[in-house]
Image: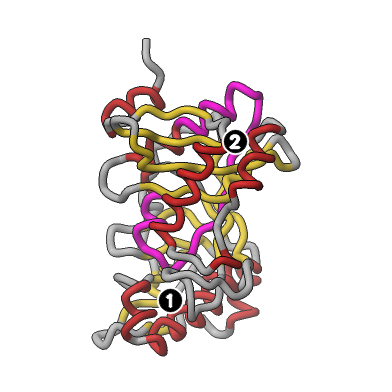
Amino acid sequence: MAGEDERAAARAGVAIRELREVGEFQQVYRLFDEIWHPKPANVPASVELMAGFAHSGNYVAGAFAEGVLVGASVGFLAAGGTLHSHVTGAIIGRGVGYALKLHQRAWARERGLERITWTFDPLVRRNARFNLVKLGARPEEYLTDFYGVMADAINEGDASDRLLAVWPVAGATDAEDGRSGPAYPLVREGADGRPVVSGGGGPVLTVGTPRDVERLRREHPEAARAWRTAVRETLGAAMAAGGRVAGFTERGEYVVIVNQLFHRCYGSL
């Protein structure tokens, strides 16, 4: 009987397997270049790095549709029974990314690992929804400007703040939006597309995200920077004070359970 990862791959119309050959790593390099258009000093994963990872027992896998590479993922073993997924890229809208993540989880399970971690930009709404709702991962840490300056077509011109997502290997993939009661909007999107930060509220807060931060970076960079600051100073502060991200709503909001320490640090809420 096919496993969940195999069924997801079949639905996406791909075959997923580990990669071993230099020619395969070169295909991944070209795919990532098409997705991120990075400058030479900022490639997500070099051919040499992928070769070294694969040879030393780490995770390098590709998804193929009729022999053409349409998605790939590169990860490495980390402390605490963890696979850290360094970079995953796929054609959007076909379920390839989801199939890759399930393949990754099956790979980790076979090796007795306990969890998979990765980082993602908290401002990119579709990624947050995929990670928190589709997969059921949860952010455990807000990382300020984690990668420093990133020179590529998607991230250039913005600080590289990230959330560290944690996905238990044995856990369920189903996830709710995290709203078990009334929640106060701490950050919401204004009529002009810029963030509006509010004071007040209670133990459950929502932190909104822009509808398309990548477009904002291109067309309205000041608005994109305003979003970065607003989310850093609210979501980042709440998590630093022990707050827990419980889910992500259909409107693109993080649902955050906070405590009194956050209220004292942030101000009168």
**Does residue 142 belong to the magenta stretch?**
no
* Colour scheme of the picture: secondary structure
Confirm whether residue 180 shows in the render: no
* 66 or 78, nearer to the observer: 66
Q: Position of residue 247 (x, y in %)?
A: 43, 54
Q: Establish if 101 lies above or below 180.
A: above
Tell us which disc is closer to us: 2 or 1.
Answer: 2
Separation of residues labelled 2 and 1 (CA atoms)? 39 Å
The residue shown at (60%, 65%) is 142
Q: Establish if 240 lies above or below 77.
A: below
The residue shown at (30%, 50%) is 92
Question: Which residue in the structure is indicated by mark 2?
Answer: 59
Q: Quadrant of the N terminus?
A: top left
The residue shown at (64%, 79%) is 265
Q: Position of residue 21 (x, y in %)?
A: 56, 32
Q: Indicate left or right for 95 with 123 as reference.
A: left
Q: Establish if 129 lies above or below 121.
A: above
The amino acid sitting under disc 2 is Tyr
Pointer 2 local density, CA inside 10 Å: few below 14, some 14–19, many at least 20:
many
The amino acid sitting under disc 1 is Leu
The residue shown at (34%, 31%) is 67
Give the number of callouts. Answer: 2
Res 186 label: 1
Q: Position of residue 229 (x, y in %)?
A: 51, 82
Q: Position of residue 103 (x, y in %)?
A: 46, 30
Q: Indicate left or right for 156 with 59 as reference.
A: left
Ranked by sequence position, the earlier of labels 2 and 1 is 2
- Residue range highlighted in magenta: 103-131
Confirm whether residue 88 shows in the render: yes
* 92 or 49, nearer to the observer: 49
Res 112 label: none
